[in-house]
Structure formats: structure tokens, C-alpha cells
């Protein structure tokens, strides 16, 4: 009887999955992944790179993350997890958790009942993952991946990304800077593959490899191809697909492509594995930058290594829009809730370039949004209490949400939604810099796919738009943001709060004792509205707010154009003096680069410029005078507006 019971228990255990425990402590060390320069990197238990995680669908994962930094907070996000009932394990600080202070441990404890495939994990604090705090996270579909729908012989993981020769702490001050008015992102030095370069992959002939390519970078998209070999896509971002053959992939940061790769029958020759920058994402392309990286697919290591593989065009990469999920989920019906977001990059009064959804650049609240939702009772369904600068949108239980994203910027941006995969129903073509941005037109759009592609990270093309749909079937607090770490730093994020009343009633959503202690240790309140007010939920006095706008009605692009005119115009020098530290040559170059204005166009506009220069010289002066006031306000703007409660 007891034996039978024990057996039953054992079987249940088997079905429910194992518990995998990881004890990780962050720290600083040195490494030289690109073979060019040794630099400080973030280590895991003193090691670099961070370990691979491999679990099986249904397992419980426990990651004890100890903050081993002496002077910075940290958090960990496992990218793409649905975390049903476990939103507090998601990672973004001030959203789903309190930051983990130095010498403290947060226990990430979650199950993976409905995710399979290739994922990754990374710090969700202060772009720490650009300093190396990131790794691969694979979830087998059943024991030994036995439920995976396609046959293969071997598995291989390739982790790609870009690499800087300096730390984020060194790069950020110059990026978020008055002297970088166009928001030009730092240029990486190299592309990495498996945290190195010149990688050798020894393959056997006549084999089918399940190759998982994971972009754990924080900025540039990469073209990826293997000389004379087809890549048969079978999974993207953890969503299994019908096979689609490609010769080249375009992989944004945070995206994953799993492909079947059949090796040749002959071992006569070795082949190049190619990575290439999407150089349209770089504001300048330094002469020394190697835009492509060659690694080696070796059939026979006694034979010579391959040279780089040339391609006629980079336009032939697979368009993920046309992929069909293996599990054919039909197009969601007409939405219950439509969200429309315009992406804008613009300057505020401190001269720094920020990123906006509509007119809001995300600023974290004082109380994490989850804690506000859990403590607000019936007010939890009113987005106002989460703060006016967090861009919080409340979603009702199980409603169908359509998110329309209109990119008014000239760059490509990869957007990531936490806690979901979404259906992609429209992605419009790029719009040339010389034309105006094209917004989605609901009464004139391309036909929606019957079985839309689903994934968790999707790029929007320059000055173009995409439309996605998903079901709000995951009560929790979820970030939607650009996965370019520089743009997240600039505030390109919104917060979605799904069904907060169900969240409040769910036992597993209550803060763990460990979580409460982490909050206490770092001095973050776990009750109250965005400003920490627990008595008057609609009083946001003292909340965190964005820097105030540039006075005089200068808007984002206006400002850039304005700097440009100033620099180009006859009164340019006066402006330069006012700016003080600005380097004339450089600013001009960067602004031209950013706006893609040809010098010829400039000359034509000469008259207007002189006029503009006069205006800018005076406006800038008054803007600077007001800056002092701005600085004070920035620290704690007093908000006393009380809206009608819903
Ligand atoms: C993790 O640490 C706990 C104690 O803090 C220990 O009991 C456990 O064995 C460790 N697990 C692993 C996998 O290192
Ligand atoms: C890769 O090769 C280049 C020269 O081709 C070399 O400078 C670099 O150090 C190598 N990197 C690594 C990590 O081996
Ligand atoms: C880490 O996880 C284990 C589970 O094995 C748990 O018992 C332990 O208390 C955790 N350690 C710390 C330091 O939180
Ligand atoms: C904190 O850590 C940094 C980086 O490891 C180190 O340079 C610094 O000296 C440390 N500070 C203290 C107070 O220990
Ligand atoms: C860590 O987080 C706490 C709470 O928000 C904050 O007071 C502290 O300044 C943060 N530390 C750093 C180094 O950012
Ligand atoms: C770190 O925390 C441990 C207990 O978790 C404590 O014993 C130790 O003194 C702390 N170290 C520092 C430097 O605060
Ligand atoms: C993880 O969560 C489960 C379910 O709540 C709980 O039984 C278990 O004790 C937790 N483990 C740790 C290490 O906190
Ligand atoms: C690349 O790294 C992964 C772990 O992230 C490892 O499993 C794989 O074997 C490596 N590939 C090569 C060719 O070394
Ligand atoms: C790789 O880049 C170099 C210069 O950076 C260029 O000469 C070469 O043509 C490029 N190769 C490919 C395959 O694009
Ligand atoms: C954004 O615009 C809306 C509507 O015009 C306004 O209510 C809100 O205060 C603005 N927010 C910010 C941060 O400027
Ligand atoms: C949402 O749908 C799920 C599954 O269909 C169901 O279990 C749940 O009760 C629904 N939630 C509400 C609040 O209706
Ligand atoms: C609909 O959009 C297409 C493509 O953008 C455009 O060519 C066409 O003129 C539009 N039709 C209407 C009625 O606006
Ligand atoms: Cu972006």
C-alpha cells in the first residue's frame, strides 16, 4: 500500500516535472571575448560566460540570484516566459519586483508548463546584460525533446550578439547626454558568436542538425547565413512553425530562430558561417568596423578554413511575417481593446534625446506596478494610480487586444511583449527618409493572415507600422518595450496590467516572503500608488516624472533640425559657444547622418537657415535659462490633479 502510494507520488512527480535549482551570484571580472581587448564583464559565480540552462516543459525552475555587486542593484528576466500566475518572477524592476540590492538574494521560482524551445535570460536592470549578464535558456518539449514535431540527429546552439570594448557605465554618460542631441547609439566594436569570434563548429556529413540561433545582443540586428546551406525554419521565439526554407535570416536582438540544417554528404570542403551587421542601425560606420564576421563550419579539420562567403544581396532574408505556426491558431477576432502607439525620438529640456510612445517617455514609479495593483483594491483598474509617466494601460480579463504601432522614427526597432506571444497581422514596408512616416490605416490595410505568425519580439521598419493582436489571458503586469537597451534607457516602454482584480485574488500572485524582504532591504514600499500614497490613491504628489519639454514649442524633430540649422547657419558659432562643449564637426556629421539630409538640400535651404539660426540662438538662450528651474522640477514635480475615478 505504502509502496503503491510512493510509486504514485513518484509518477506524479514525473508528470509535474522536476525542480531545477541554480544558485547564481553576480560579480565583476575580466574577459576578452572578441580577442581584441580584455575588459570588465559581469560574471556568474566568478565565471564568464553565464551558464546554459536546459529544462523540460513542466519543470519548476528556481534561480537564487544573489547580488554580488557592491554598489548596483540587479534583477533577472527569463525572456519569453508566460509565467501564468507568477508575474512577480518576471524581472523588470519597479514593474513586477523590487530591485535586488547588493548582498541580497531574490529567489526566482517559476514553472514552465506552456513554453518550449529556445529562450534566453538576462538582467533587466541598467543594461547590465550588455556587460555580459545573459545566457541561453532551452526548454525541451518533453523528455529529450521527444514531442518536437520534426526529426533531427543532433542539436546545436549558437548565441550571437554585438560587443563593446567599454562597459555600459562608461558608455551611458556620453549617450544620455546634452552633447548627443540626436541620440546616436554607441557603435559596437565586434559581433560575437558563442561569446567569442572565429568559432569552429565541427559537423558530421549526412546529419540533420537542430540549430538554435539566439540573439542575446542589446542593439543591432544581424544577418545570418551559412555558405551553400539552406536553413529550414521550424521555430521562432518558442513558437513551432511549418517548415520554411531560407538562405539567410535577419535576427533582431532578443529573437530566436530554430532551423533544421542538413549537412552535405561529402567532407571535401569547409563552409563559412556568416554574421553581418544591419548597418542601417548604426549612426556612423567607422572605417575600422568589420561589418561581417566569419566562423567556420568544419566538415574536415585537416582541410583549410573557409574564406568569408559573399552574397549578392542582403534583401533575400526570410520575412518572418509569412511563417505559419505549427499549431494553427486562427486570427483573433475584431479587438475589444485597441491601443495605438506612436514611436517618437525627441529632446527634452535637459538637451538629452529621449524615446516616446505618444508623448510619454517611461519613468519608473516609486512603488512597483505589481505592488500598486495588489494593494489598491477596487482602484487597481484605474490606470491613473500607476502614475502619469509609466504609460500604464489596464486590460480586462480575456479581452482581445490590438496594438497598432506607428514608427515615426527613421530607425528599425525590435519590440518585445512580456508574458505573451502575439499574432502579427500587419507589418508595412519601410518608408524612405525623404517621405513622411506612414501610419496604419484601419480602413485600408493588407489582408490579415488566416493563421498569423506568432512570436514575442517583432521589428517595425523605418517610418512604418505593425499591428499585433493577443488575448489578455495572463493576469499580471507586463512590459512592452523596445529591446534595444539604449532605447529602453531612453524610455521606450509602456506597462500593461492585465485583469488586476483576478491578480489580487490569486494566491500564487501574492508576494513571496523572500520578495517582501528584498523590497524591505532596498527600501522600496510594497503598497500605495505610483507615488507611494496609501491613503489617497488619486494623489500622485511626489511621483517620478519625465524632464519637462523644451520651451517655445520646439518638438523632437524640430529640435534636431534646429540644432542642424544653427550649426549650418551663419550664426552657428554663437550656438556652439552657448553649447560650450559641442564639437562642430561632429554634431553636423551626426545630425546629417540622423536626418539623412544631403548637403545639396542644405544649400537650397540656406535662406531659411539664416532665419532659423537667429531664432535658435535666442531660443536656446532662454531654454538654458529655464533649465535651472527644470532641474529642480525634474526631481519631484508635484502632481495634484485628481481625475474622475472610473
Ligand atoms: C543552492 O543553495 C542552497 C543553499 O542556499 C543549497 O541547499 C542547494 O544545494 C544549492 N543548490 C545548488 C544546485 O547549488
Ligand atoms: C579572431 O580573429 C582575428 C583576426 O582574424 C583576431 O584579431 C581575433 O583576436 C580573433 N578573436 C578570437 C576571439 O579568437
Ligand atoms: C535557493 O534555493 C533552494 C532550493 O533548493 C532554497 O532551499 C534556498 O533557500 C535558496 N537559497 C537562498 C540563498 O535563497
Ligand atoms: C565595488 O566594486 C567595484 C567593481 O568591482 C570596485 O572597483 C570598487 O572598488 C568596489 N567598491 C567597494 C567600496 O568595495
Ligand atoms: C537600488 O535601489 C534602491 C531602491 O530604489 C535605490 O534607493 C538605490 O539608489 C539603488 N541603487 C543604485 C546603485 O542604483
Ligand atoms: C551579506 O549578507 C550576509 C547574510 O546574508 C551577511 O552575513 C554579510 O555580513 C553581508 N555582507 C555585507 C558586506 O553586508
Ligand atoms: C517555489 O514555489 C513553490 C510553489 O509555491 C513552493 O512550494 C516552493 O517551496 C518554492 N521554492 C522555493 C525555493 O522558494
Ligand atoms: C555554442 O554555445 C552553446 C552553449 O551556449 C554550446 O552548447 C555549443 O556547443 C557551442 N557551439 C560551438 C560550435 O561551440
Ligand atoms: C565584409 O566586410 C569587408 C569590409 O569590412 C568587406 O570588404 C567584405 O566585402 C565583406 N564581406 C561580405 C561577405 O559582405
Ligand atoms: C500627454 O498628452 C496627454 C493628452 O494630451 C496629456 O493628458 C498628458 O498629460 C501628456 N503627458 C505628458 C507626460 O506630457
Ligand atoms: C479567462 O479565460 C480563462 C480561460 O479561458 C478562464 O479560466 C478565466 O476564468 C477567464 N477569466 C475571467 C475573469 O473571465
Ligand atoms: C490603400 O493603400 C494603398 C497602399 O498603401 C494605396 O496605394 C491606396 O491608394 C490606398 N487606397 C485608398 C482608398 O486609400
Ligand atoms: Cu528601439
Image (cartoon, rainbow, N blue to C red):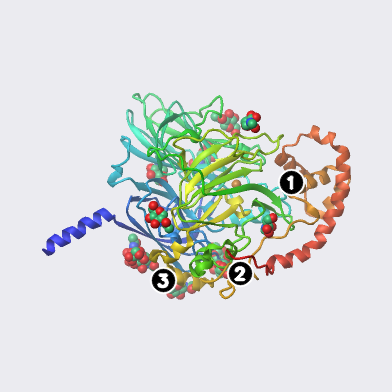
Mark closest to the chain's N terminus, 3 or 2: 3
Seen from this angle, which residue lies furthest bottom? Answer: 535
**Quadrant, the C terminus:** bottom right
Q: Between marks 3 and 2, how big is the CA–CA gap? A: 28 Å
Q: Which mark is in front, 1 or 2?
A: 2
Total of numbered circles in the picture?
A: 3
Q: Which percent across, then down, holds residue 85?
A: 40, 59
Q: Quadrant of residue 504?
A: bottom left
Task: Kindly state the secondary structure of the residue where label 1 is placed.
Answer: helix
Q: Residue at x 82, y 45 (%)?
A: 567
Task: Kindly state the secondary structure of the residue where label 2 is placed.
Answer: loop
Q: Which mark is in front, 3 or 2?
A: 2
Horizontally, residue 639 falls left or right of residue 24, namely: right
Label 1 CB less than 8 angstroms from ligand 13: no
Find disc 3 in the rendering and name its residue. Answer: 513
Q: Which percent across, then down, holds residue 643?
A: 64, 65
Q: Residue at x 62, y 45 (%)?
A: 187
In this view, the residue in front, 43 or 339, is: 339
Q: Residue at x 54, y 37 (%)?
A: 426
Vertical placement of 634 versus 211: above or below? below
Residue 557, numbered label? 1
Q: Quadrant of ligand 7?
A: bottom left
Q: Which percent across, then down, holds residue 532?
A: 58, 71
Find disc 2 in the rendering and name its residue. Answer: 538
Q: Between marks 3 and 1, how big is the CA–CA gap? A: 48 Å
Amino acid at each position: 500500500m505504502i509502496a503503491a502510494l510512493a510509486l504514485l507520488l513518484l509518477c506524479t512527480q514525473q508528470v509535474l516535472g522536476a525542480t531545477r535549482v541554480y544558485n547564481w551570484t553576480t560579480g565583476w571580472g575580466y574577459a576578452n571575448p572578441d580577442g581584441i581587448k580584455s575588459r570588465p564583464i559581469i560574471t556568474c559565480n566568478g565565471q564568464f560566460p553565464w551558464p546554459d540552462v536546459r529544462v523540460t516543459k513542466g519543470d519548476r525552475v528556481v534561480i537564487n540570484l544573489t547580488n554580488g555587486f557592491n554598489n548596483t542593484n540587479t534583477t533577472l528576466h527569463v525572456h519569453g516566459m508566460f509565467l501564468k500566475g507568477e508575474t512577480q518572477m518576471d524581472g523588470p524592476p519597479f514593474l513586477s519586483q523590487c530591485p535586488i540590492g547588493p548582498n541580497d538574494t531574490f529567489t526566482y521560482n517559476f514553472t514552465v508548463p506552456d513554453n518550449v524551445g529556445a529562450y534566453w535570460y538576462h538582467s533587466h536592470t541598467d543594461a547590465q546584460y550588455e556587460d555580459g549578464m545573459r545566457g541561453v535558456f532551452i526548454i525541451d518539449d518533453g523528455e529529450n525533446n521527444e514531442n518536437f514535431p520534426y526529426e533531427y540527429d543532433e542539436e546545436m546552439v549558437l548565441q550571437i550578439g554585438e560587443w563593446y570594448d567599454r562597459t555600459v557605465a562608461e558608455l551611458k554618460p556620453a549617450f544620455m547626454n546634452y552633447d548627443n542631441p540626436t541620440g546616436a547609439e554607441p557603435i559596437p566594436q565586434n559581433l560575437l558568436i558563442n561569446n567569442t569570434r572565429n568559432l569552429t563548429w565541427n559537423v558530421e556529413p549526412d546529419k540533420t542538425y537542430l540549430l538554435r540561433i539566439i540573439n542575446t545582443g542589446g542593439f543591432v540586428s544581424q544577418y545570418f547565413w551559412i555558405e551553400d546551406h539552406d536553413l529550414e525554419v521550424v521555430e521562432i521565439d518558442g513558437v513551432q512553425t511549418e517548415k520554411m526554407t531560407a538562405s539567410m535570416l535577419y535576427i533582431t536582438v532578443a529573437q530566436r530562430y530554430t532551423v533544421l540544417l542538413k549537412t552535405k554528404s561529402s567532407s571535401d570542403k569547409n563552409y563559412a558561417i556568416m554574421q553581418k551587421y544591419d548597418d542601417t542601425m548604426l549612426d556612423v560606420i567607422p572605417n575600422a568596423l568589420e561589418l561581417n564576421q566569419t566562423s567556420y563550419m568544419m566538415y574536415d579539420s585537416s582541410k583549410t578554413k573557409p574564406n568569408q562567403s559573399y552574397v549578392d544581396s542582403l534583401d533575400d532574408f526570410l520575412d518572418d511575417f509569412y511563417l505559419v505556426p505549427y499549431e494553427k491558431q486562427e486570427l483573433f477576432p475584431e479587438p475589444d481593446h485597441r491601443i495605438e502607439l506612436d514611436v517618437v525620438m525627441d529632446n527634452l529640456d535637459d538637451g538629452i534625446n529621449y524615446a516616446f510612445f505618444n508623448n510619454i517617455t517611461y519613468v519608473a514609479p516609486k512603488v512597483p506596478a505589481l505592488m500598486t495593483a495588489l494593494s489598491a483594491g477596487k482602484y487597481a483598474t484605474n490606470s491613473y494610480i500607476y502614475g502619469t509617466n509609466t504609460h500604464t494601460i489596464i486590460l480586462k480579463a480575456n479581452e482581445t487586444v490590438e496594438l497598432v504601432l506607428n514608427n515615426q522614427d527613421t530607425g528599425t526597432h525590435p519590440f518585445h511583449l512580456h508574458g505573451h506571444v502575439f499574432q502579427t497581422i500587419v507589418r508595412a514596408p519601410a518608408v524612405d527618409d525623404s517621405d513622411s512616416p506612414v501610419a496604419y490605416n484601419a480602413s485600408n490595410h493588407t489582408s490579415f493572415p488566416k493563421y498569423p505568425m506568432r512570436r514575442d519580439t517583432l521589428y517595425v521598419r523605418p517610418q512604418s507600422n505593425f499591428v499585433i493582436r493577443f488575448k489578455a489571458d495572463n493576469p499580471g503586469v507586463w512590459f512592452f518595450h523596445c529591446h534595444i537597451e539604449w532605447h529602453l534607457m531612453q524610455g521606450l516602454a509602456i506597462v500593461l496590467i492585465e485583469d488586476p482584480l483576478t491578480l489580487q485574488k490569486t494566491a500564487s500572485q501574492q508576494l513571496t516572503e523572500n520578495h517582501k524582504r528584498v523590497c524591505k532591504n532596498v527600501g522600496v514600499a510594497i503598497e500605495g500608488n505610483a507615488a507611494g500614497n496609501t491613503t489617497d490613491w488619486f494623489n500622485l504628489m511626489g511621483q517620478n516624472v519625465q524632464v519637462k519639454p523644451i520651451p517655445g514649442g520646439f518638438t523632437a524633430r524640430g529640435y534636431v533640425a534646429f540644432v542642424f540649422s544653427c550649426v549650418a547657419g551663419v550664426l552657428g558659432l554663437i550656438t556652439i559657444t552657448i553649447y560650450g562643449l559641442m564639437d562642430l564637426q561632429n554634431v553636423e556629421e551626426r545630425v546629417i547622418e540622423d536626418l539623412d539630409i544631403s548637403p545639396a538640400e542644405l544649400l537650397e535651404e540656406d535662406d531659411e537657415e539664416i532665419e532659423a539660426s537667429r531664432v535658435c540662438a535666442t531660443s536656446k538662450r532662454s531654454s538654458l535659462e529655464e533649465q535651472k528651474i527644470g532641474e529642480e522640477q525634474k526631481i519631484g514635480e508635484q502632481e495634484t490633479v485628481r481625475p474622475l475615478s472610473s
